[in-house]
Amino acid sequence: MGEAILGIIGGSGLYDVEGLADRESVALETPFGQPSDAYLTGRLGDVRVVFLARHGAGHRLMPSEVNYRANIHGFRQLGARHLLSFSAVGSLREDIRPGDMVLPDQFFDRTKGRQASFFGEGLVAHVTFGDPVCQALCGTMAEVLAGLGVRYHRGGTYVCMEGPVFSTRAESSFYRSLGASVVGMTNLPEAKLAREAEMCYATLALATDYDCWHASEAEVSVDAVLEVFRQNVAVAKRAILGLAARFPPAGTCACQRALDGAIISDPRRAPPETRARLALLAERFFRG
C-alpha cells in the first residue's frame, strides 16, 4: 500500500503544524468540490504528514459550511490512510475539566442534513459503524498522551450538534442524561466519511469549558473557548510530534477494508458519472 502517511485535521485554534521539513502547500479539486483550504504537506522526522485546517485560514467556515466530503477525499488523494482530528469541545462530565484531552470512542448525531456519505446516485453502501474510531490509532494516541504526562480520558461519547450557537441549558442537561462525555460541532461527519474512505480515524478532543450545565462556571463564550484552547495548543503540537514518532500505529484493524461487503448495489450498473466520482474510493469494485 506504499508509504504510511499521517493526516491531521486542525480544529479551532490549530491552523498549522510546526517543525515540518520540506513544507509545501497543495491546493486540490475533488469530485465533491473544494476542500476548506490548501493542504500543508511535509515531514516530521521520517513520517510524511498532510495537514488541513478544517475551518480554513482565518477560520472562515462555520461547522455547517465545511465541505467534509471534499476534505476527507482530499486526504485520500494525497495518500493519507490514517487521520487524527482535533476538536474543541464542551465537557459534559465533572471529571473532564477544561484543559483536559479526550479520546472519544462513540458519537451521537444531532446535526441536520449534512453531507456525510460519498455514496448515492446509483451506488449504495452501508458500512459498519458500531465502533466509529480506529482502536489501533486511538491506542497509540493514548500512549502518546500518557508519555506527555497530560490529563486525558480514553473513551466516551462525543455529541455532534449542529451549531453554530452553543447549547441551551436544556440541551446540555439532556446530553448529560444520555451519559455523553463531550459536545462539539464537527467530528461525526468526518468519522462517517473516513470509514467510507477506508481510513483509520481518531478524534483528539480538547475540553475548553463545561458547556452551560455547570452551575458554578460561567456560560460558555468564544473568548473562553479560545483562551483554554490556546493554552492547549502547545500540548496538541507535542502530541502530533509524539504520534509521528510512533507512526504507523501498532495493532490491527479493519478500517482500511471497510467497504468489503458494504456495497449493496451492483457496481456494474452504476451511472458513469457515479463511477467516476467514486473511482478513488471504490475502484476495486468496478473491475470486470
Image: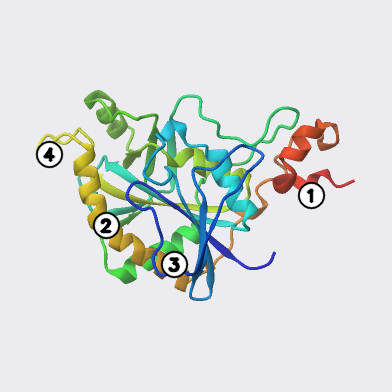
Residue 274 locus on image (x, y percent):
75, 34
The circle drawn on residue 243 is 3
- Quadrant location, the N terminus: bottom right
Question: Which type of secondary structure does the marked residue at label 2 adopt?
Answer: helix
Of marks 4 and 1, which one's residue comes earlier in the chain? 4
| Mark 4 Cα-neighbour bin, 10 Å: few <14, some 14–19, many ≥20 | few
Q: Quadrant of residue 185?
A: top left
Q: Of all residues shown, which one is farthest toward the right?
A: 288
Question: Which type of secondary structure does the marked residue at label 1 adopt?
Answer: helix
The circle drawn on residue 284 is 1
| Mark 3 Cα-neighbour bin, 10 Å: few <14, some 14–19, many ≥20 | many
Q: CA distance from mark 3 to mark 2?
A: 16 Å
Is residue 108 at least partly visible in the picture?
yes
Residue contact between numbered discs 4 and 1, judged by CB atoms under 8 Å: no
What amino acid is labelled 4 in the image? Glu
Q: State which mark lies toward you, 1 or 2.
A: 2
